[in-house]
Structures are given as C-alpha cells and as structure tokens.
Image (cartoon, rainbow, N blue to C red):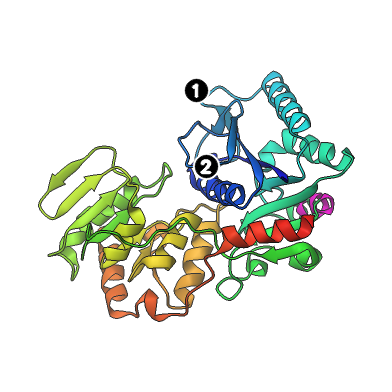
Amino acid sequence: MSRVFFHVQHLLGIGHVRRAAVLARTLAARGFDVLLVSGGAPLTLDLGQARFHQLPPVRARDQGLRELSQLDGRPLDDAFRTARTRQLLALFDAEQPDVLITEQFPFGRTQLRFELLPLIESARMRTPRPLIAASVRDIVRRSVSPQRVRETIDHLKAFDLVMIHGDPKLIGFERSFAGWPAIRDRAVYTGYIADTDPATSDVGRDEVVVSAGGGAVGAPLLQAAAAARPKTALANRTWRLLGAPRAERREGLIAEPLRADFTTLLRNATLSISQAGYNTVVETLSGAERAVLVPFGTARETEQTDRATWLAERGLVTCVPAETLSPDTLAAAVDRALRGPSIRSFPACDLKGAAATATLLQRRLA
C-alpha cells in the first residue's frame, strides 16, 4: 500500500483544509495509506480511512495574511518554528512515505518556508526518493512580484508534479500564474475537487441562500443581503443567511450557522449569494440555479476577485466587487442574475478532481 504524506495549512478560513480532507478521504478510499498533517486551528473533519496529525497550530494575524501568530495571538518566535519543524521532520521520517504532497506551496504559504523547505529537502535526500507533488487551486494570487514568480519556479525544480485542481476549459492556470511556460511540463489539470451530494430533501426550496463561507470576513455580505432583500424581485422569498454568529428568525429571513446540507440548499434555491472561495464556487457550479458572487479581496489577495470576475465574463454568474458592496448594488445584481441564464444551461465543468488525482498518483507510482 502506497503511503501519502499530505501537508496542509489553513490560515484565515477553512477552505484549504476542507479541500485537502476531501482529497485525503478519496485517496484513502482508493487504497492509499494517507496521513493528513494540518498546521491550522483544530477542526472536526470527515477523513474516511485517512489518518490525521495536528501540528502546533498557527493562524494569520489579520486579513492581510502577511504575518502568522499562534492561536492566542502571540507571534511565532525562533523556538516555536524550530520545535514545529523538528516535529514535522520526525513525523515524515517515521512515515517513510511514497508521496509527499504540499498544499498550495510553493505558489502560496510562503510564510511556512521555515518548515516546508526542510521537509522537501528531506524528501529529496531519501532513498528511495518519494514522489513530490504540489496541490494547487485553479487560481493563485496574481499580485505577486516577478521576483516571487521566479522564486516559485525555482522551488518547483524539486517537484515531480504540479496538480492543478481546476478545469482549463473554464479558467486556465496561466491567467493567474505568470511563470506558466516554465512549469507546464510538470503540470496536470485534475478537474475541480468537489464534495457534493445530490439533493435529498426539499429543504430550502425556492429560497435565496446567502453564505458567508467558512472564513472570518463574511459579516458585511450577510448584513448587505438582509438590507437588500426588500429591494429585489425576490422580496417575497425566504432568504437564508448562513454563517451568522447566532440563529435568528424574522419576517422573510432565517439567520443560522453554516449547515452540513449546504449543497442540498444550493440545489433547491432560486438564487445563491456568496463569496468566491474555491470550495463555495465549486459547490455553486455543481448545483446552483443562479448565483451572485461577492469576492473577498485586498490589493494583495486577488484570487477570489479573479475567480468571480472571470466566471462573470463567461456569463455563469453575476459579480459584485467587494469595494462596491451595498444593499443597492447587491439588489441590482440579484435582479441581473434573475434575468440572465441559468448556470445549469452551460456545459458542466470537470468536478471529478479527487478521483482523477488518485488515478494520477497511482499511474506515476506504477
């Protein structure tokens, strides 16, 4: 049985570790012995037969994602970094994996170079040498400097494989990564990694589902949606606000925490309003009727804005830039989405990325 050592780090939201969990669960179901090693805040995850190890957790200090801290806000010092790196390398040595997967690195997570570069070097020096693979989303941060692009290309010389979890018919990786010509010989599109199930009930039928996602930056979206409702053509529908800090019901509005049956709600809803993180967009494309995306973004963090903008260019969704978000702009976007085509009228994108990744790794190891 081939062994997989899978490193993942979530910093602000939980999207990275959720996607990694789906992939780890699928690999384990396909016969791999998988250890998912997480460096973020502890979470309850459905890992199937995959194993799990929690590193001393760190998080982003703020929305800028430039600095890391411990969960209690204390900055990382050299002693913390050294201890965590030693734990990671000892674990890797004990596992003796056939495959090492880094999630997002070296396209992102550069704050973790202190442990990831030694981990990759340890893999390179091992005999027999494991397959070293990068697991990356459909889009990376476009705002990186030319120097950072060159650094990424240089780090990728140690990698055998770049697994792009996207569909080039929808969004090509070259649109966000300027160094594409230098890595294309090692890059393989797997399709999107989706954790979706068909609707099994009528819950949420004909509602508007507003989701703030699993991150910490969704409150303005929920507030704007509640105020936009009476201004839209769907003012007579129930609007369900997911990701609210507490459960609440008032006329036409249901506010509640995130739900495990989110994909069922999406399939049953008339319209979805959400941010534009990878997991939410994949779930939207796999089942929603119509959608409005309000991407989280900063001058440095361009991924969600690019994803929402490029999907809107193709006509699949309606986009409201975060800096223009208000009840009026959101209401206008809702009405535009209702006049536009259904997402279901477009050719389906490739959502079989988890299974395709397992097949890809099996073939490379063979």
Task: Give the Cα separation between the discs numbered 1 and 2.
Answer: 27 Å
Q: Which disc number belongs to residue 72? A: 1
Q: Amino acid at mark 1?
A: Asp
Residue 331 image offset from top left, x and y in percent: 25, 65
Does the image show residue 161? yes
Q: Quadrant of residue 340?
A: bottom left
Looking at the picture, does residue 171 appear above or below residue 283? Answer: below
Specify whether 29 is left or right of 257: right
Residue interval drawn in magenta: 152-158
Does the image show residue 325? no
Q: Quadrant of residue 53?
A: top right
Write the residue at 45% across / 73% down: 312
| Magenta span: chief secondary structure | helix
Foreground pick, 128 / 103: 128
Look at the numbered disc 1 and give the secondary structure of its residue. Answer: loop
Q: For mark 2, what is the residue?
A: 47
Picture quarter with the N terminus: top right
Specify whether 206 is left or right of 251: right
Crowding near the residue tagged with mark 1, few <14, some 14–19, many ≥20 C-alpha atoms within 10 Å: few
Q: Amino acid at mark 2?
A: Leu
Specify whether 232 is left or right of 3: left
Q: Which disc number belongs to residue 225? A: none
Residue found farthest to the left:
251
Residue 260 image offset from top left, x and y in percent: 35, 47
